[in-house]
Image (cartoon, rainbow, N blue to C red):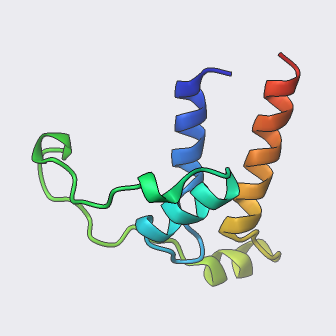
Amino acid sequence: MSDRLEEIQIRRLLVAIDGSDSSTLALRAADAFELDAELIEFAPPPAAALPPGPVPYDTSLSGPATERALGRRLPGVDELLIGLRAELDRERSSV
């Protein structure tokens, strides 16, 4: 699996259902992947990286509403990170 594909999968995963902000998610992902969280820098994105037009302030999902609609409990972010880590480890070991 390419590093770019892994990055895309991790970015998709980090859409929090439990309402964590991006800083908290970055720290939790560093922990799950045994990465040095001290290397994470928090800052606003560069203006050139923003899309033209307004940017939504809150893009969170409602976990409880989704759970009710599906009739089942959703995994938390930590569970998803553990699952992703296991999947990536399996992929790497099969190469």
Residue at (53, 36) in percent of width and height: 7
Looking at the rendering, in which quadrant would you find the N terminus? top right
62 or 30, nearer to the observer:
30
Residue 30 quadrant: bottom right
Instruction: Pick whichever, 88 or 13, lies toward us.
Output: 88
Q: Number of labelled discs?
A: 0
> Residue 51 location, x and y as percent?
19, 44
Residue lying at 75% horizontally and 46% vertically, measured from the top left: 85
View extreme (top): residue: 95
Residue 5: quadrant of the picture: top right
23 displayed left or right of 8: left
Q: Position of residue 94 (x, y in %)?
A: 88, 21
Image-based side of 9 in relation to 50, left or right: right
Image coordinates for residue 36, horizontal then vertical, percent? 55, 53
Task: Tell me residue 52's x, y (percent).
Answer: 12, 45
Is 77 rendered above or below residue 14? Answer: below
Position of 77 compared to 23: left or right?
A: right
Q: Quadrant of the C terminus?
A: top right
In the image, residue 84 sits, relative to residue 44, either above or below, namely above
Query: Which residue lies at the image location 76% right of the left edge and 68% below the top edge?
Result: 75
Q: Nearer the viewer, residue 33 or 2?
A: 33
The residue lying toward the viewer, choosing from 8 and 65, is: 8
At horizontal 27% and vertical 70% (from top left) the residue drawn is: 57
Q: Measured along the vertical axis of the image, is residue 9 above or below residue 73?
A: above
